[in-house]
Image (tube, rainbow, N blue to C red):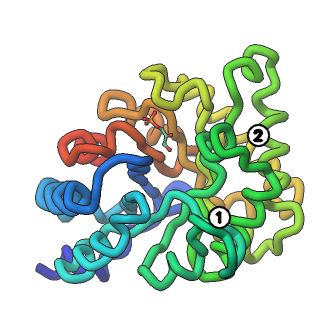
Amino acid sequence: MAARSRDVVAKPNPRNGRCRLISGNWKMNLNHLEAISLVQKLHYSLRDSDYQFTEISVHPPFTALRSIQLLLETDRIPISLGAQNCYFEGSGAYTGEVSASMLSKLGVKYVIVGHSERRDIFGESDEDVAMKANAVLGLQMTPIVCVGESLSQRERFETEGVIQSQVDAVVAAMSSELCEQLVFAYEPKWAIGSGVPAEPADAVVGANAVRSAIAKHHGEDVSSKVRIQYGGSVNSANAKEFLDQGEIDGLLVGGASLTAEAFTAVIQA
Ligand code: 13P
């Protein structure tokens, strides 16, 4: 079926020229057999038209990447393969780590870097996140750079300052040519896994803070090309509200990407 070949490329949003990206971050869930089953079900429940204006990526744990790569290629499924993390060094004595080049060899297109769980549980700094983003770009893959404030920072009205310094750390020393390829995900920490999403207006404030921080270093033209997702308690009931905001170019979905039914409902919302 031609329309479902891997050659399907989602068309950009005519309002702003940016192509929507809806990504499923599975976190530490699903073994490789469960992962295969989920992608097969997702493929059967999505319609050809679902791929036309939205690129879809799935981000399984490392152990399922090879299985999902083979499934997507063999069945010519136009879903992009993503990873959840990588290390910034190319190779060496870094027990337990996975390099960007290893991911690139698996056909990975998007790599999430700086997820708040990586920052908070595993102590990743802004500098680590910047080095990871550069390592990913260096292998012709696209980083999805996560930024977002904690509840206490929000209560102290520090949201925009926090986002700006997280963005600064990644883009300040980067060429504009590389910067415009980035995807950012604004994920307020208090909205992740809480069942309490941000208000769409708050998500726009976050997205605008990302865009203005980029513009400060690289100008409006570059910042207008960068895609910005919203993430945090996204489900089929609220997905459309976020996507209706012109500044939001997609979604980074956790819990609601773990079943084909729920993720299809978000994509079709
Ligand atoms: P939830 O959608 O489960 O809130 O997770 C969001 C997230 O962290 C995606 O990266």
Residue type highlighted by circle 1: Leu
Element type at mark 1: loop
Q: CA distance from mark 1 to mark 2?
A: 15 Å
Q: Are marks 1 and 2 in contact (CB under 8 Å)?
A: no
Q: Residue at x 82, y 49 (%)?
A: 213
**Rendering coords of residue 216 (x, y %):** 88, 54
Identify the amino acid type marked 2.
Answer: Ile
Residue 112 visible, this orientation = yes
In front: 115, or 124?
124
Task: Please say whether residue 47 is visible from this viewpoint.
Answer: no
Q: Position of residue 244 (x, y in %)?
A: 45, 39
Q: Which residue is mark 2?
A: 163
Residue drawn at point x = 84 percent, y = 52 percent: 168
Residue 67 x, y percent position in the rendering: 28, 72
For the point 29% across and 70% down, the residue is 68
Residue 222 lies in quadrant: bottom right
> Is the CB of mark 2 within 8 Å of ligand 1?
no
Q: Quadrant of the N terminus?
A: bottom left
The residue to which callout 1 is attached is 182
Left or right, 219 with reference to 24 = right
Which of the 4 image quadrants contains residue 215?
A: bottom right
> Which mark, residue 84?
none
Compared to residue 46, the image places residue 199 above or below, namely above
Instruction: Choose the circle earlier in sequence order: 1 or 2.
Output: 2
Q: Is residue 79 left or right of residue 62?
A: left
In percent of width and height, residue 70 lies at 26, 79
Tell how many labels: 2
**Label 1 Cα crowd, 10 Å radius (few <14 / some 14-19 / many 20+):** many
In the drawing, does residue 172 fall left or right of residue 34?
right
